[in-house]
Amino acid sequence: MADMGVLVKDWPLTLAVDAGGIVVKAGSKAVGPLGPFKEGDEVCGCSRLGEKGHGVCQEYYLMDAAVTIPKPKNISLVEAAGVGAGFEVDEGSQS
């Protein structure tokens, strides 16, 4: 699939995109749909499938601010890790 450019851009491939975690570092342009992010924020959202650095099955990974939201206060980080793709599907259907 990597040779065809379909989903996989490089190997090894990590098959997971939903994520929940704590911001360790945020760039000056790290502004999500609900506002800017800063170190220490608890967040959830989606990561990129098949791109180095974005695999969510590692201790540190990259997230795109555009598809990341603050973790709702009434759920745990573990629960928040399952919100990502569902939130994106719902957000897209509201447009």
Image (tube, rainbow, N blue to C red):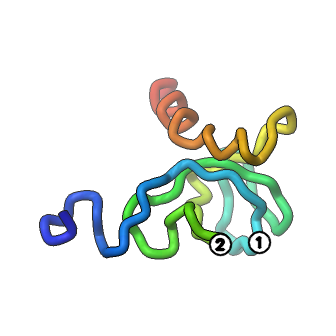
Q: Are marks 1 and 2 in contact (CB under 8 Å)?
A: yes
Q: Which residue is painted at 65% across and 72% down in the image?
A: 60
Q: Height in image: 16 above or below 2?
A: above
Identify the amino acid type marked 1: Val
Nearer the observer, 82 or 43: 82
Q: Height in image: 15 above or below 71?
A: below
Report how far apart the C-alphas of labels 1 and 2 lie in the structure.
8 Å
Q: Which residue is painted at 73% across and 52% down in the image?
A: 43
Q: Position of residue 16 (x, y in %)?
A: 47, 53
Q: Please state if 9 lies on the left or on the right of 88 as rendered.
A: left
Report which residue position mark 2 lands on: 60
Q: Please state if 12 lies on the left or on the right of 63 as rendered.
A: left
Report which residue position mark 1 lands on: 24
Q: Quadrant of residue 3?
A: bottom left
Element type at mark 2: loop
- Furthest toward the top, the residue is 94
Circle 1 or circle 2, nearest the eye: 2
- Furthest toward the left, the residue is 4
Q: Position of residue 62 (x, y in %)?
A: 58, 69
Nearer the observer, 84 or 27: 84
Q: Position of residue 13 (x, y in %)?
A: 37, 67
Which numbered disc flags the more N-terminal residue, 1 or 2? 1
Q: Quadrant of the N terminus?
A: bottom left
Q: Which residue is painted at 53% across and 33% down in the image?
A: 86
